Amino acid sequence: MRNPYPGKIFEYLRDCAQRYGPIYRFSTLHIVVINLLHPDDMELVLSQMKHMKKSRLYKFLGGWLGEGLLTSSGQKWQKRRKLLTPAFHFNVLQKFLDIFNEETSNMVKQIEEMNAQSLGGKPLINLMPIVTNLTLQSITETALGVSSVEEDTMKSYRSNIHKMGQFVFGRVTKPWSLIPLVYSLSNDYEKESETIHSLHQFTYRVMKEREKQLVDGRDEQVVSTTYSGRKIMKMLDLLLYAKINEGTIDYEGIREEVDTFMFEGHDTTAAAITFLLYALAEHPDIQENVRKEIQSNITPTRTPTYHDLQDLPYTERVIKESLRLYPSVPLITREASEDFLSHTGSKIPKGTVLYLHIFDLHRNPDIYPDPQRFDPDRFLPENCANRHPFAYLPFSAGPRNCIGQKFAILEIKAVIVGLLRKFRLEPSGCAPPSFFVDLILRPEGPINVKFVPI
């Protein structure tokens, strides 16, 4: 197979899935890639500890994320996962909801100001920038304990993360860049290094500021005192506590995990919320059903509580359907740690790079009839009962599933409740979005929606 041009990877992979799925191979130089699209193969790979090693594609993130939870494997991954798990405890998430509600209120005010400044009162608003602002502010305050990051810093950070995605997937389409020495002599390497330096500068600044507060004893945010014998606190506080009091992680290790969660905790959630708002605008009947459920469960003057948000079954089905059609991470990769047989009986040798195509899995007509249609009832209990457990993977699955999935769903619910209480969403009338893949699923152009005050 020929290599696609950079920026055309998404269309190329969809075309391959249609022609060659549910399992096919291609190679770049000496690297053989097996592409998997069937839930049986997803289960074979994701459910077993022996196939936990991430593929060499993740090594391209090493300069930025080091060996954090996303990129590490083996004992290091297990220790870090155990260390970080308390940061996503139920008690912590309950505390975070106040921040999600506050940031949603700030977004509502921002939209109201944009509406007021428009002559018609209903401007088309590009979703991705304002939603990313919300998720980035939320992650810095919830996980890092830092509030009110400057707008210019936010802009720079968003831009640099987008650049990193382009660098990583650019290397996939340029075989010469897979050779480290050759790549280190290129202009791309120089630009990537500058981008990484800028990202790290932000991280180190936040870490030093927070560490000083903890050492001075001014602001230790302990939510609870026991969880498997550990204190429960915000993620950065937990890591700094482990460094200062236990010596179980060093400064570089903290930086790896902060960078990892800053990326995973804001960019993927921003994409999920953006596509969900687009879907609600395009399907006014579904939007109205969500609004009615919110109104019947939460009185208009009351700020939603954690328990309120757990009692919105229709809204939850709508979120699931949006994540089916628009999974924030459309592709994950692994490396086969030993020979194994695919569900078709094909032998996959040890060391083979595996691409698991979640986007195509979620649009498989044998699993989801009429897969392009937005239908939340696919996730009614009776419709899910006989579905393959690995047919729906918005947060991956198995031992390496997303540690922050409950955090993400809670934030998405808080945003939807806050916005639909204030606005009716109307579509732009433009063609459906086309997609661009870097590290996450992104719209190629702006996704515009009208926010009409209720």
Image (cartoon, rainbow, N blue to C red):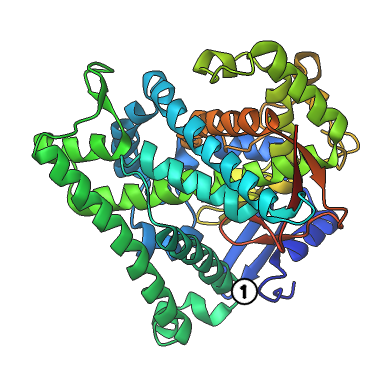
Tell me the quadrant of the picture where the N terminus can be found: bottom right
Dividing the picture into quadrants, the one containing residue 283 is: top right
Residue 24 appears in the picture as rendered: yes
Secondary structure under badge 1? Answer: loop
Residue 102 at x, y = what percent? 48, 33
Q: Is residue 399 left or right of residue 228?
A: right
Tell me the quadrant of the picture where the C terminus can be found: top right
Q: Amino acid at mark 1?
A: Thr
Dividing the picture into quadrants, the one containing residue 3 is: bottom right
Residue 169 at x, y = what percent? 57, 67
Residue 247 appears in the picture as rendered: no
Q: Is residue 290 left or right of residue 262?
A: right
Number of numbered discs present?
1
Q: Is residue 184 left or right of residue 132?
A: left
Residue 131 at x, y = what percent? 58, 47
Dividing the picture into quadrants, the one containing residue 84 is: top left
Q: Is residue 16 left or right of residue 142?
A: right
Residue with the mark numbered 1 = 173
Q: Nearer the viewer, residue 414 or 175?
A: 414
Residue displayed at 37% across by 57% down: 65
Residue displayed at 82% across by 23% down: 377
Q: Is residue 41 above or below residue 66?
A: above
Residue 154 at x, y = what percent? 44, 58
Q: Is residue 124 above or below residue 451?
A: below
Q: Nearer the viewer, residue 209 or 238?
A: 209
Residue displayed at 18% across by 36% down: 242
Q: Nearer the viewer, residue 147 or 185?
A: 147
- Pointer 1: residues within 10 angstroms few (<14), some, or many (20+)? some
